[in-house]
Structures are given as structure tokens and as C-alpha cells.
Amino acid sequence: MKFTLTQDGVATCALPAATIAVTRTSGGTTGAIDESVYVMAADNGSNFRIASCQYVYNLSASALGVGTYRADIKINGTVIGNAIFQLK
């Protein structure tokens, strides 16, 4: 997962810390997913890393199982964006 932050419509490299939270919204047991399930070796817990003025997180989808998921992106505890994805 990659994204950039903009300020006044322009991409910026002044990036505050950001975290990810994944929730299963349908299929199987719904609810928040423990980060230990989707974290990969390149990741540091739920923290995005910053590379080339972008936020980067390698989400390990193989352990999540079939279902629909929402990934929330948080800065300072506030959700600033999200993505919905489905695994079959």
C-alpha cells in the first residue's frame, strides 16, 4: 500500500508518522484484525515507512483469508483515508 500526502493540493515530503488498521467487514468473523496477522518483515508493526516522499506498507494479504476488508490510514490517531479491498 502506498500513498502520498498533499498540502494545498501539492505533494509534500514533510510527512508525519502514519499507521494502518485493518478491519474485516464481511466474510468470516468481522472486526478489527490484529496487526500480527498482516505485518511483514519490512514493516514495523502498524507503522507506515517513508520512502521517496511516500508512505509505504507491505500488507500480507495471504494470512487474512477470504472476505472484504477496510484499511484505515491514521495520522495522529485520526483516520485520514481508507481503502476497501476483497480477497477471494
Image: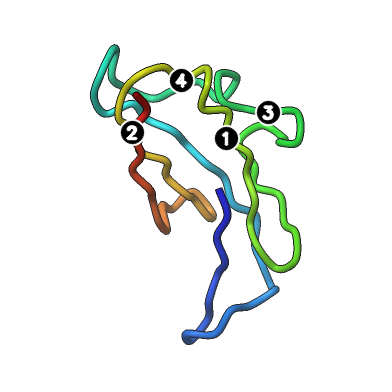
Mark 1 to mark 4 CA distance (whole Å): 10 Å
Question: Where is residue 75 drawn, in percent x and y?
Answer: 53, 55
Type of the residue with mark 4: Leu
Asked if residue 86 lies left or right of residue 42, the reply is left
Q: Secondary structure at mark 2?
A: strand
Q: Secondary structure at mark 1?
A: loop
Labels 1 and 4: the sequence-earlier one: 1
Where does label 2 land, which residue?
A: 86
Image vertical order of residue 30 relative to residue 76, above or below:
above
Cβ atoms at labels 3 and 1 below 8 Å apart: yes
Where does label 4 land, which residue?
A: 64
Type of the residue with mark 1: Leu
Type of the residue with mark 3: Met
Where does label 1 land, which residue?
A: 59
Labels 2 and 1: the sequence-earlier one: 1
Q: Return the residue found at the far top.
A: 29
Asked if residue 59 lies left or right of residue 26, the reply is right
Q: Secondary structure at mark 4?
A: loop
How many C-alpha atoms fall within 10 Å of the one at disc 4: few (<14), some, or many (≥20)? some
